[in-house]
C-alpha cells in the first residue's frame, strides 16, 4: 500500500508541472474569466507543491546545506521573475512593488517561517537546537543587505523621495551580489559544518553519506523543477490582475499585492522548512528561511537594478518609518533568538507576533 502511494505521488508530481506549462501556453496574455482563474489557481498550487517535492529530491541527492541553497535560489527566481514582469506592466503602481515584495519576503522568512518552525519544533521536542555560528552569520548578512537596500534610500539626498541615484543603486546591487556570493561560499565550502543540523549534545549531523536518489532520478527532478517554476511564474502572472483588482475592491493598500506575491512564492519554502522541523532538523529550517531572505534581497535588487534601465517609471526602495521599526525589531529579536543556539515556545511565539503585526499594519497602515 505504501509503495502504491509513493508511486502515485511520484506520478502526480511529474504530471502537474507539465500540466502547468500547457495551461500557461493557453492562458498567456489573455483576460481570464472567473472559472478559468479558479482552475489556474488550483494548478498553480499544485505546481508549488510539485516544486517542493522535486527540490527536496535534489536536496537529498546533493546533501545539506546545498539542498537548502537549491530551494532558496529556485524560490528567488520565481520572485524576481514575478517582480520584473509585474513592474513592467504596472506603470506607476509598480514603482514600489520590488520594495514591498522584498520586505514582505524578509518578514515572512525571518518571523513567519522562523517563528512557526521554532513553535512546531518546541511543541514536539520542548527545546530546539541549532548552530549559532552559521545561523548568526546568515542573520547578520540579511540585516546588512536589508539596511543597505531598503533603509538607506529613505535617507539619501541625491534624488527626491526614497530612491537611490544610479550610482547608489549600482553600488547596492554590486554589494548585494558580493555579500550573497561570500555567504554561499562560506555556507557550502569554507565553513559548511556551521550550517549542518546538530544533535542535542552539539554533534554535527552530516547527511552527505546518506543513500539518496539516483543521478537519473535527480536529473529528472531538475527538469521537472524547472517546468514547475516556469508554470508558477507564468500562472501567477496570469492571476495577478485578479489579485490587484481584489485588493483594490477591498480598499486595501496596493502594498498588499507585494505581500500576496511573497506569500505565494515562499509557500514551497515554508512547507519544506516545516517538514525539516518535523524531522528535528531545525538548522535546515533556519537555513531555508534565512537563505530565502538573503537570496530575495541579494538577487532581487541587482535584477531590478538592471531592469530599471529599460523600465520608465521610478524605483522606490526606501521603507517608511513603521516598516523600519519592524525591521529593526526583527533584527534585535532574531539576534537574541540565535545567540543561545536553542529556543523554546516563547521565541517562536515572539517571532509569530511580529509577523502578525506586520500583516496587520500592511492591511491597515
Image: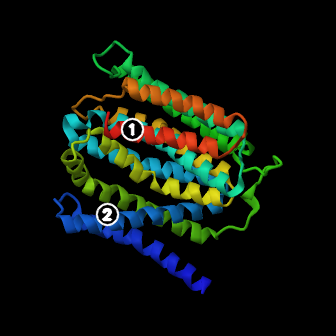
Mark 2 vs 1, N-terminal side: 2
Decide if residue 175 is in sight here.
no
Residue 46 versus residue 57: which sits nearer the camera?
Answer: 46
Residue 222 in the image: state x and y as whole percent: 51, 63
Residue 222 left/right relative to 99: right
- Residue shown at the point (67%, 58%) measured from the top left: 124
Res 324 quadrant in image: top left
Residue 158 in the image: state x and y as whole percent: 33, 13
Q: Would you name the residue on which mark 1 appears?
A: 303
Which residue sits furthest top? Answer: 157
Give the structural element (helix, strand or loop) at label 1.
helix
Determine crowd level at label 1: few under 14, some 14-19, many 20+ residues with C-alpha closer than 10 A.
Answer: some
Q: Are marks 2 and 1 in contact (CB under 8 Å)?
A: no
Decide if residue 214 is in sight here.
yes
Determine crowd level at label 2: few under 14, some 14-19, many 20+ residues with C-alpha closer than 10 A.
Answer: some
The quadrant of the picture occupied by the N terminus is: bottom right
Residue 213 versus residue 252: which sits nearer the camera?
Answer: 252
Q: Would you name the residue on which mark 2 appears?
A: 41
Amino acid at each position: 500500500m505504501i509503495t502504491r502511494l509513493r508511486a502515485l505521488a511520484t506520478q502526480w508530481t511529474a504530471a502537474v508541472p507539465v500540466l502547468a506549462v500547457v495551461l500557461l501556453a493557453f492562458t498567456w496574455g489573455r483576460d481570464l474569466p472567473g472559472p478559468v482563474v479558479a482552475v489556474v489557481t488550483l494548478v498553480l498550487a499544485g505546481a508549488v507543491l510539485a516544486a517542493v517535492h522535486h527540490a527536496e529530491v535534489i536536496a537529498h541527492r546533493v546533501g545539506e546545506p546545498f539542498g537548502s541553497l537549491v530551494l532558496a535560489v529556485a524560490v528567488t527566481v520565481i520572485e524576481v521573475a514575478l517582480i520584473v514582469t509585474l513592474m513592467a506592466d504596472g506603470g506607476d503602481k509598480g514603482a514600489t512593488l520590488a520594495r514591498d515584495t522584498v520586505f514582505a519576503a524578509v518578514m515572512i522568512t525571518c518571523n513567519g517561517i522562523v517563528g512557526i518552525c521554532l513553535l512546531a519544533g518546541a511543541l514536539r521536542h520542548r527545546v530546539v537546537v541549532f548552530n549559532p555560528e552559521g545561523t548568526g552569520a546568515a542573520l547578520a548578512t540579511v540585516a546588512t543587505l536589508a539596511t543597505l537596500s531598503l533603509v538607506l534610500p529613505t535617507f539619501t539626498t541625491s534624488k527626491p523621495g526614497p530612491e537611490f541615484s544610479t550610482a547608489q543603486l549600482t553600488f547596492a546591487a554590486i554589494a548585494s551580489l558580493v555579500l550573497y556570493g561570500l555567504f554561499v561560499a562560506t555556507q557550502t565550502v569554507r565553513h559548511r559544518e556551521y550550517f549542518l543540523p546538530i544533535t542535542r549534545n552539539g554533534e554535527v549531523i552530516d547527511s552527505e553519506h546518506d543513500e539518496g536518489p539516483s543521478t537519473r532520478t535527480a536529473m529528472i527532478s531538475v527538469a521537472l523543477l524547472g517546468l514547475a517554476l516556469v508554470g508558477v511564474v507564468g500562472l501567477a502572472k496570469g492571476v495577478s490582475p485578479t489579485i490587484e483588482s481584489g485588493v483594490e475592491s477591498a480598499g486595501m493598500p496596493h502594498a498588499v499585492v507585494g505581500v500576496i506575491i511573497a506569500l505565494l512564492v515562499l509557500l514551497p519554502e515554508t512547507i519544506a522548512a516545516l517538514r525539516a522541523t518535523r524531522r528535528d532538523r531545525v538548522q535546515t529550517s533556519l537555513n531555508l528561511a534565512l537563505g530565502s531572505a538573503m537570496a530575495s534581497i541579494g538577487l532581487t535588487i541587482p535584477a531590478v537594478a538592471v531592469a530599471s534601465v529599460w523600465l520608465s517609471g521610478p524605483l522606490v526602495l526606501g521603507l517608511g518609518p513603521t516598516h523600519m521599526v519592524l525591521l529593526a525589531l526583527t533584527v534585535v529579536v532574531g539576534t537574541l533568538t540565535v545567540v543561545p543556539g536553542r529556543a523554546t515556545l516563547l521565541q517562536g511565539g515572539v517571532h509569530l507576533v511580529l509577523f502578525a503585526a506586520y500583516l496587520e499594519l500592511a492591511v491597515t497602515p
